[in-house]
Image (spheres, rainbow, N blue to C red):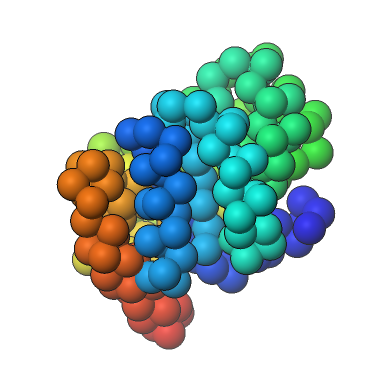
Amino acid sequence: MNKQETLERIKQLGLLAVIRGPSPELTVQMVSALIEGGVYGIEITYSTPSAASVVRSLNEKFGDKIVLGMGTLTVPEQVTEARDSGARFIVSPHYEEQLAKAMVASGLAVMLGALTPSEVFTAYRTGADVVKIFPGSLVGPEYIKALRGPFPQIPMTPTGGVDEKNIGDWFAAGAVFVGAGSNLCPPAWAKEGRFADISAQARLFVKAVEAARQKK
């Protein structure tokens, strides 16, 4: 799966699960539960213990059944590690020039974090395939709608504050897809062994994405 195929599949799915797992073993179980619920876009963050090892394990277990990437990259050295672990896409929570250039040079699908109009435009000009608006909970769907006025050419996705009730609002505002973290897959549920609940929550999110797209 090349970069463009990765981006196209993520857009088709419409949803990335942003996972901050409590342990390597529980993270793999979280992903299994999400897949059971129909979520196939998976972002393993670097705040997950042994994140790169988890990605390698997930690649071995699920292969092309999922679209697997790594997030919360904060230093350039993580770019090479993520690529070597089998990540198809990489995501940062912020814009920093050296990190951004290393991510773009990787050849992987790149999502750079930004918030202000200047950061959004700079991230896109640097080479981001999609600009991640973070934290989305701080600004809401109307902010993406406002940004798309001056920047209609920039693909944007929110992370933070996305839940099954407001997914439709994010898509209506112009998001190309959405990223959901603890509202979709709470680490506390994994610690409590509530994997069936994670699968049920995943189904709610998938239905919300489908409903939002039918309205467009």
Q: Please indicate whether residue 208 sits to the left or right of residue 213 in the image.
A: left
Give the image quarter of residue 77. top right
Depth check: 6 or 112 in front? 6
Image point (44%, 36%), residue name = 24
Let me know if residue 124 appears in the view.
no
Counting every numbered tag in the picture gives 0
User: Percent from the top left, x then y, of residue 62?
Assistant: 61, 59
Is residue 184 left or right of 59 when viewed as pictured? left
Whether residue 41 appears in this view of the structure is yes
- Quadrant (top left, top right, bottom left, bottom right) of the C terminus: bottom left
Name the foreground residue: 104 vs 67.
Answer: 67
Residue 141 drawn above or below residue 18: below
Residue 2's spot in the image, x, y percent?
Answer: 81, 54
| Residue under the point 62% across and 65% down | 65
Q: Is residue 68 left or right of residue 1?
A: left
Q: Residue at x 55, y 26 (%)?
A: 73
The one nearer the camera, 115 or 185, is 185
Q: Residue at x 38, y 61 (%)?
A: 33
Which residue is more in the foreground, 212 or 47?
47
Q: Position of residue 68 (x, y in %)?
A: 60, 50
Place of residue 177 in the rendered image (x, y in percent of width and height, measured from the top left): 49, 60
Q: Residue furthest bottom?
A: 214
Quarter of the image where the N terminus is located = bottom right
Q: Identify whether 129 is placed above or below 134.
A: below
Q: Is residue 188 above or below residue 78?
A: below
